Amino acid sequence: AQSVTQPDIHITVSEGASLELRCNYSYGATPYLFWYVQSPGQGLQLLLKYFSGDTLVQGIKGFEAEFKRSQSSFNLRKPSVHWSDAAEYFCAVGRHSGGYQKVTFGTGTKLQVIP
Amino acid sequence: DGGITQSPKYLFRKEGQNVTLSCEQNLNHDAMYWYRQDPGQGLRLIYYSQIVNDFQKGDIAEGYSVSREKKESFPLTVTSAQKNPTAFYLCASSSDRAYGYTFGSGTRLTVV
């Protein structure tokens, strides 16, 4: 069975500081990994995804994530956080299964940005 | 622009009532999904559909029903059998040609 752990429920950073959100996954084969962002009362937006190739993945809004197979991790990073980055972030692991994608989400990390 | 439209944005249900949440997509995606989101629990899969006229139960299907009569539409009915329906409901779709979901903006259901 596939699973995702986001160990940090809530993180606070100062505007302009760097950010790293942690994600660990459990999956028996090469996983498809995702990071999504959710603003309050909104749906989820895909930030970036990994399924093969370069282990450092670039996404939208200046985010990047690094896949580390040996650590079963897919941490999200941003060098300089903006106030507009305050949101909830979800890591997810997925696989194709016939005609659909089975995706399992973590419980989320809520990011607060202080001036 | 293509996307997923969920309606209504807010919905209130009285005890014992069935309510239906709408989800429409114009992305030409084959697969569609319904998730329930509760604080601190992430997203949990209710139902999914790979093609028209076919759908499968997810992890928490009890008290919910769906239909898929058209490729574009995947409505979710929250029945009176669902004992704790207050939650944020998200619809999503996916394509065989790309990895990852596209989400709608959600419906917040509250029991009054």
Image: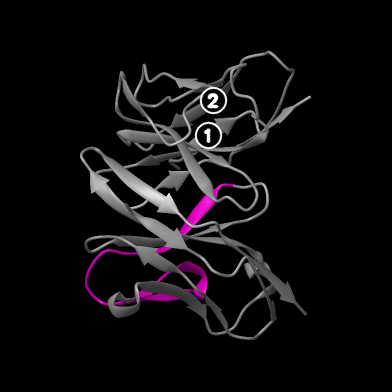
In percent of width and height, residue A2 lies at 34, 55
Question: Which quarter of the picture shows residue B36?
Answer: top right
In percent of width and height, residue A52 lies at 23, 68
- Cβ–Cβ under 8 Å for marks 2 and 1: yes
Q: Hey, what amino acid is under mark 2?
A: Ser
Q: Residue at x 59, y 23 (%)?
A: B82
- Answer with mark 2 or mark 1, whichever residue precedes in sequence: 1
Question: In this view of the protein, which residue sits in the foreground, A66 or B8?
Answer: A66
Question: Which quarter of the picture shows residue A15?
Answer: bottom right
Distance of mark 2 from mark 1, alpha carbons? 8 Å
The lab-note entry on whether marks 2 and 1 share a chain reads yes
Q: Hey, what amino acid is under mark 1?
A: Thr
User: Is disc 1 surrounded by few (<14), some (14 to 19) or many (20+) residues within 10 Å?
Assistant: some
Magenta residues (range): A43-67
Q: Residue at x 26, y 77 (%)?
A: A54
Subunit ID for the residue under disc 1: B
Residue B98 appears in the picture as rendered? no
Which structural element holds mark 2? strand
Horizontal side, residue B110 vs residue A60: left or right? right
Residue B8 appears in the picture as rendered? yes
User: Taking B55 as reference, is A40 above or below it?
Assistant: below
Q: Residue at x 54, y 69 (%)?
A: A7
Residue corresponding to mark 1: B5
Disc sitting over residue A74 in the figure = none
Residue corresponding to mark 2: B22
User: Is disc 2 surrounded by few (<14), some (14 to 19) or many (20+) residues within 10 Å?
Assistant: some
In percent of width and height, residue B20 lies at 57, 19
